[in-house]
Amino acid sequence: MRLIRIVMLVILAAVVSACGSNRDVAAEATVLAASWRDPSPASLTLVTVVNTRSGDGAHSALIVNGSQRVIFDPAGTWWHRSAPQRGDVLYGMTPQLLDFYLDYHTRETHYTVLSELRVSPELAEQALTLVRGHGAVQNAMCAVAVSGVLRRLPGFESIGSTWFPNRLREDFAALPGVTERVLRDDSPADNRALLARQQQQSLLR
């Protein structure tokens, strides 16, 4: 039995190996200054990064579009000097910075699935409050954290608590009204050079 548990832990670590946070915590004044509102309808968008070869889910994140647009990116590795982070929430997610985030994850070894659900402004604010109060997430716990937030929202009780991004995506996709979009890119698997280039690009506001 002990051997089986060890094997399962090794498999789990491999499945969610893309989750590994290494960020600084921004000052509250910096976070407030970066706040950005998307004029489109309130929504929740589940981000699932999937390995193109194995089909395994590699990372989960949640885009919350309410009074401001943020990304709850538990134990994520993307960062930008203009997207301050507190408690694994990325602020100031303008269209350009959101494109940067998605481009970073989408490459020859991984594709990205965006599962979007329009919600009431009130529910979006509830989700925003939950992610902002969540705190930093340990490595490899991205799907656990995102599923935990969603399960606390009214109407999302069917979302199961899971370690696996693909399972979370399946549960989310089963909700009425969800639409999905798949992003693919043939850029190199090593995205560190891309991240460095993003830091040098001029930003639009």
Image: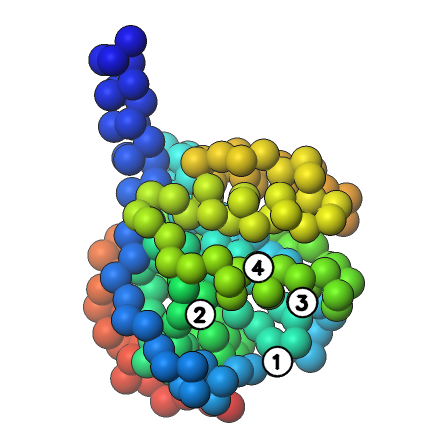
Look at discs 1 and 4 and give the one toward the viewer: 4
Under circle 4, the secondary element is helix
CA–CA distance between discs 3 and 2?
16 Å
Amino acid marked by disc 2: Leu
Label tally = 4
* Residue 100 coordinates in the image, percent (x, y): 41, 71
Residue in the picture at 53% in, 82% down:
35
Under circle 1, the secondary element is loop
Q: Residues within 10 Å of mark 3 (few under 14, many from 20)?
A: some
Asked if residue 151 lies left or right of residue 204, the reply is right
Asked if residue 158 lies left or right of residue 85, the reply is right
Locate the N terminus and report the quarter of the image it occupies: top left
Determine the image quadrant of residue 123: bottom right
CA–CA distance between discs 2 and 1?
13 Å
In the image, residue 73 above or below residue 149: below
Mark drawn on residue 130: 4
Look at discs 1 and 3 and give the one toward the viewer: 3
Q: Earlier in the sequence, mark 1 or mark 4?
A: 1
Mark drawn on residue 37: 1
Residue in the picture at 69% in, 44% down:
156
CA–CA distance between discs 4 and 2?
14 Å
Tags 2 and 1 touching, CB below 8 Å: no
Q: Earlier in the sequence, mark 1 or mark 3?
A: 1
In the image, residue 69 above or below residue 102: below
* Residue 102 coordinates in the image, percent (x, y): 44, 63
Q: Earlier in the sequence, mark 3 or mark 2?
A: 2
Mark drawn on residue 125: 3
Front residue (pair 112, 69)? 69
Q: Earlier in the sequence, mark 4 or mark 2?
A: 2
